[in-house]
Image (cartoon, rainbow, N blue to C red):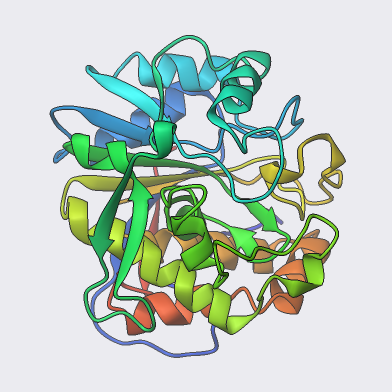
Amino acid sequence: MERQAPVIGSKNVTGQNYQGSAAKVYFTDKIDTEHLIKLYKMINENIFGKVAIKLHTGEKNGPNILPRDMVKAFQAQIPDSAIVECNTLYHGDRYTTEDHRETLKINGWTFCPVDIMDEDEATVDFPVNNGLHLKFVTMGGHLADYDSLIVLTHFKGHTMGGFGGSIKNIGIGCASGHVGKAQVHILDVNNLPGDDEDDLWPEGEIFMEHMCDSAKATCDHFGKHIIFINVMRRMSVDCDCAGVEAEEPTIADIGILASTDILAIDQACCDLVYSAPDGKDLIERIKTRQGLRQLSAARELKMGNPQYELISVD
């Protein structure tokens, strides 16, 4: 019997019941350039002007990052667009702009402009309207130069967040490397834990709430001119931040999802993982990190609709 994806949030991993409207989340189980572009064209009505494509470009030689050829063909469809990134808070291959540029070359992100938005420590503060904790988040300064934002996400696990979807991609990824990311991680930028002090980085629900505050700031800034695409392939329990050290995926590829609703798309991806017959390892990662707090916090922040209709485009 063919496995069916949930429809209208029928498998709701947050344990809450909803009535009323449903967001539209478009879905295909075919992970290729043709279907990526097809989904994009279904939700791109309000994407215009100078366009940022927020992508996790990964540590050097990361085995799980999105295929360069697929992203190249996608980016070519979008005039006046650039991939955007920020430097990292941890000491890795993207900690400094110089190292980040070298990593971009090694990973093949050379076919279009790549804007390291906090280059030369450029920053801009985005307000968090009615946030759970934060009043503002310091973003990469160049983010304010763009009219529209496409959040192109490799959905996978995450060491601290449990899972990394659209919320994580912008909640951490748009924050400036050495200021904003410290705010999101609830750390003193002048007194950061060392690389061998991983247990000193705050985790759990409080971290998820800060991450959602940050994502909300970016969503509010772009308004209707932001869309979300999650690619569910090579879903290691580890983020692309882990590079070659990432655990080999144990869950099969699922497909591509696209929506104008950040909560609905991440909710749908989690539902698909929870309903997958081989989802055990990724589910455990999500549970042990209290990752589902991302979804409930986003709901409390009114960032989107947790109830969705999954619409197949095949």
**Residue toward you, 75 or 159:** 159
Q: How many numbered circles are shown?
A: 0
Nearest the camera: 17 or 165? 165
Q: Quadrant of the C terminus?
A: top left
**In which quadrant of the rendered view does residue 301 lie?**
bottom left
Q: Is residue 178 above or below residue 109?
A: below
The residue under the point 77% across, 30% down is 63
Pick whichever, 35 or 179, lies toward us.
Answer: 179
Instruction: Please state which of residues 291 and 274 is positioned toward the viewer in this rendering.
Output: 291
Percent x, y for residue 71? 49, 22
Farthest residue, direction top: 111
Residue at image location 27% in from the left, 70% down from the top: 128
Whether residue 211 is situated above or below residue 106 in the rendered picture: below
For residue 239, say whether it is visible.
yes
Q: Find residue 13 and report its horizontal and vertical position in percent.
A: 58, 79
Residue 126 coordinates in the image, percent (x, y): 25, 59
| Residue furthest front in the image | 190
Residue at x-position 43% and y-position 90%: 17
Quarter holding the N terminus is bottom right
Residue 8 visible at all: no
In-image side of 118 versus 290 (left or right): left
Report the residue at 37% width, 33% height from top: 53
Q: Position of residue 86 (x, y in %)?
A: 47, 39
User: Which quadrant of the view contains residue 146?
Assistant: top left
Q: Is residue 213 left or right of residue 124?
A: right
